[in-house]
Amino acid sequence: MFSGDIDERVREIAEYVSRTQSTVRAAAKHFGVSKSTVHKDLTDRLKRCDAVLYRKVCKILEKNRAERHLRGGMATKRKYESTR
């Protein structure tokens, strides 16, 4: 999906996450790259590209990290409800 510049990819992914409040996994699926790449882009590379956007994205990542156990519990609940 990306033809070249890494900084361009980093900004595009960060803007997507900022706009949609999506998770790393959802962003990776949307852009067709690995979760590791998205995580590296958002936590390391974005800091040197765009500090303002980095702070915004960090808040979203922290929120997602805090809610992770809740989403996992709901997924397990749906799984077992569907087998009844």
Image (tube, rainbow, N blue to C red):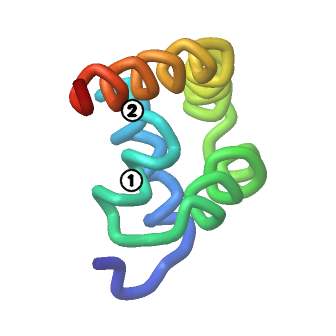
Q: Disc 2 marks which residue?
A: 22
SS label for mark 1: helix
The 10 Å Cα crowd at callout 1, few under 14, some 14 to 19, many 20 or more, is some
Marks 2 and 1 sit apart, C-alpha to C-alpha, by 13 Å
31 relative to 68, above or below: below
Q: How many marks?
A: 2
Residue at image coords 54%, 13%: 70
The disc at residue 12 is: 1
Identify the image quadrant of the C terminus: top left
Q: Nearer the viewer, mark 2 or mark 1?
A: 2
38 relative to 69, above or below: below
- Residue 32 falls in which quadrant of the image? bottom left
- Residue 66 falls in which quadrant of the image? top right
Q: State the residue lying farthest toward the bottom.
A: 3
SS label for mark 2: loop
User: Which amino acid type is marked by label 2?
Assistant: Ser
Q: Picture coordinates of residue 35 (x, y %)? A: 56, 60
Identify the image quadrant of the N terminus: bottom left
In the depicted view, which residue is nearer to us: 9 or 79?
Answer: 79
Residue at image coords 45%, 65%: 9
Q: Picture coordinates of residue 20 (x, y %)? A: 30, 28
70 relative to 18, above or below: above
User: Which amino acid type is marked by label 1?
Assistant: Glu
In-image side of 16 versus 83 (left or right): right
First in sequence: mark 2 vs mark 1: 1
Q: Picture coordinates of residue 12 (x, y %)? A: 38, 53
Circles 2 and 1: CB atoms closer than 8 Å:
no
